[in-house]
Image (cartoon, helix red, strand yellow):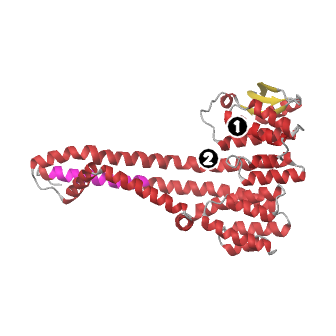
Amino acid sequence: MAIFSYRAATAEGTVLEGVIDAADEKAAVERLRNSGVIPLKVTSPKEGTKKLSFRSSKADLLTFTTELSALLGAGLPLDRGLNILAEISESKETKEFIQSILKSIREGSSFSEALQQHPKIFPRIYVNMVRAGEAGGVLDVVLDKLNDFLESSKELKDHVVSAMIYPAILIVTGGASIAVLLTFVLPKFTTIFAELGKTLPLPTQILLTFSKGLQTYWWLVLAAVIAAWIIFRNAVKSGPGRYKWDAFKLRLLSDVIRKLETARFCRTLGTLIKSGVPLLQALNNSKDVINNQVIASAIDSVSKGAKEGKGIALPLTNARVFPPLALSMIKVGEETGQLDDMLLKVATTYEKSLRIAIKRFVSFLEPAMILGMALVIGFIVISMLMAIFTITDLPF
C-alpha cells in the first residue's frame, strides 16, 4: 500500500484535499469515487511535494481539461465546474482565463465561443472539438477524448525533446572548448614561436593565422553569425523560403519527419472525427498541426478529393507524403466504416515507430558529432606538436 495525495470536490462544489492509502493511483481514484467525492488530481507523495517554478500554458491546458472532464463526468453543471477550477487553481494566469471564460458564459456565450476568445491558450482543434461536443450534448465525453489527445501529444513531444538534450549539450560544450583553445590557449604559443623565429609547419601557420584573426575580429565574426541567423529566420518565415527549408529537411530526415507528421495528422483527424466534427472541417484542422509545409500543401489535395466524394484514402495515396503502411490501414478503415478508430491505430503505430527512428538517429548523430569535434581538436593538437618538434629539432 502507498499513500497518495489527492484533490477532490463534492457535488456541492466544496474542494477537499488530503491523503489516501491505496495500492496504486487507479485504486486511489476508485476509493475516492466510492466515498462520494469527485477526484480532480491524485499524485504520489514524490509528485505531490514537487514544486514547479514554471508551468507552460500547454501543461495548464492539460490540467484544466483533465479536471473539467472529471467534474462534468460526475454530473456537475459547466458553470459550477469552472467556478471550482478557478478557486483551486494555483496559477494566477490560469485562474484569470477561467474567470474570463466563466464571465463570457454567464453573459450568454457558449463554452466554445468563450474559448475562442483565448486563441493563444486554446488552439482551433480544441475549440472545434468542444463545439462538436456542445452540439451533440456530449461535452464531457469530448473533453475526455481531448484529454487523451493532449496527453499523447505531450508524451510524444517530451520524448523528442529529451532525445535531443544530450546532442545539444555536446554541441555547446564542444564548441565552447574549441573557442577557448583558439582564442586563449593558442595566442600564448604564438608569442613563444615568434620569439624563437623559426619557420613553422604550414598547418601550424594556418592554425595560428586563423586564431589571430578570430582573436582580433571576433566581434566581426559574431556580427556575421547574428546577421546570418536573422537573414535565415526572415527567409524561412516567408512562404517560399519556409517551403524550401521544409523540403530540405524532408530530404535530410525523411524517415523521422514523415513518421512524426503521420502520427500528428492521424491522431488529430481520428480524434476530431470520433468527437463528431465533420470530415472536411476535421481535415482543415488536422492540416494546422502539420509543421512541414511540403506535407501540409499535399493535404490540400486530400480536402479537395474529400469534397468530390473520393474519401481520403485515395487522395492521400496520390499525395505520396505518408508511408505505405499508414495508407493501407487508412484504406481498410474507410472500407469498413471505422476510419476514426483506424486513424488512431495508425497514430499509435507511428508514435512507437517514431521513437525507434529518433533513437536510431540520435545513436548515429552522437558519435558523428564526437568524431567531428575530435578531428578539429586533433588537428589543433597535432599542428602544435609539429611546431614544437620542429623548434626542438626532434623527429616527428
Q: Quadrant of residue 55?
A: top right
Q: Is residue 376 magenta?
A: yes
Instruction: State left or right for residue 124 relative to residue 164.
Output: right
- Residue at 76% x, 36% y: name it: 99
Q: Dot 1 corresponds to which residue?
A: 94
- In the image, residue 257 lies at what x, y percent? 60, 61
Name the residue nearer the viewer: 235 or 141: 235
Crowd band around label 2 with a 10 angstrom C-alpha radius: few (<14), some (14–19), many (20+)? few
- Residue at 21% x, 50% y: name it: 385
Element on which disc 2 rests: helix
C-alpha distance separating marks 2 and 1: 22 Å
Q: Dot 2 corresponds to which residue?
A: 158
- In the image, residue 345 lies at what x, y percent? 75, 58
- Residue at 39% x, 48% y: name it: 174
Residue sticking out furthest to the front: 107
Q: Does residue 144 show up?
A: no
Name the residue nearer the viewer: 232 or 340: 232
The stretch of residues the image draws in magenta is 369-389
Viewer-side label of 2, 1: 1
Residue sticking out furthest to the top: 18
Crowd band around label 1 with a 10 angstrom C-alpha radius: few (<14), some (14–19), many (20+)? some
Q: In this view, does 203 lie above or below 40?
A: below
Name the chief secondary structure element in magenta: helix
Name the residue nearer the viewer: 278 or 194: 278
Instruction: State left or right for residue 372 relative to residue 364.
Output: left
> What numbered label is drawn on residue 201?
none
- In the image, residue 378 lies at what x, y percent? 30, 52
Q: Does residue 233 show up?
A: yes
| Image quadrant in which the N terminus is located | top right
Q: Which amino acid does label 1 sit on?
A: Thr
Element on which disc 1 rests: helix
Q: What residue type is labelled 2?
A: Asp
